[in-house]
Amino acid sequence: MMNILKGLQTTLKHLNRESVTLQYPEEVRPFPERFKGRHHLRRYEDGLEKCIGCSLCAAACPADAIWVEAEENTDEERYSPGERYAKTYEINMLRCIFCGYCEDACPTRAIELGQEHRLSFTDRRDAIFTKEMLIDPVPEGGQDTPQQVEPGSRDRSIPDMPDAQ
């Protein structure tokens, strides 16, 4: 009898407390500013891709989730301001541990982890995010890649490179 009263006392004590349960997805708890979610491949203002195909992100990835295949830029088909660009860029989201090492290793800040957290897959093939799925849309006033440029005009210049912090 004493155990029943003890249990009833515990129940009554917690009865008037405010609920901590959220009605997801109608209510979403805000994430911290430093939350690392879905990856994005960024572009410059003129529409060129920031990724230069260096594969440093793939080398830094402890889960071996990133695959980069680089190809040479030409003046007739320019994708990035550097000598090369990422012809193939894939991230296996089933392997990714969202550590952010790829973001830290990138010299041009091409790969960034955003705030998007709703990632679900019904098939293993859907979990492999390709370059087309990751790349940002062309900014307003920009031009889609590949671009044709004047010979020699973009050889060793990378626009808007952020200062080292």
Image (cartoon, rainbow, N blue to C red):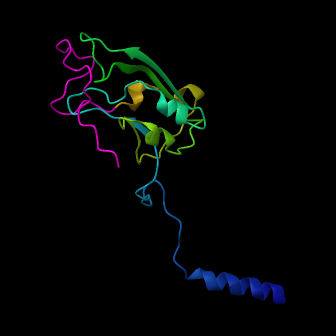
Lateral position of residue 124 relative to residue 83, left or right: right
Is residue 149 inside the magenta stretch?
yes
Q: Measuring from the top left, give residue 50's x and y in whole percent.
A: 32, 30
Q: Position of residue 76 (x, y in %)?
A: 24, 9
Front residue (pair 109, 26): 109
**Relative to the observer, which residue lies in front, 38 or 98?**
98
- Across and down, in percent, residue 134 comes to 40, 31
Q: Position of residue 144 (x, y in %)?
A: 24, 22
Whether residue 26 sits left or right of residue 81 in the image: it is right
> In percent of the image, x 47 and y 44: which residue is there?
118
Where, by quadrant of the figure, is residue 16 drawn?
Answer: bottom right
Front residue of 164/28: it is 164
- Quadrant of residue 45 within the rendered picture: top left
Give the magenta part as a residue range: 136-165
Q: Is residue 123 above or below residue 148?
A: below
Which residue is located at x 31 percent, y 27 percent? 49
* In the image: residue 141, left or right of residue 39: left
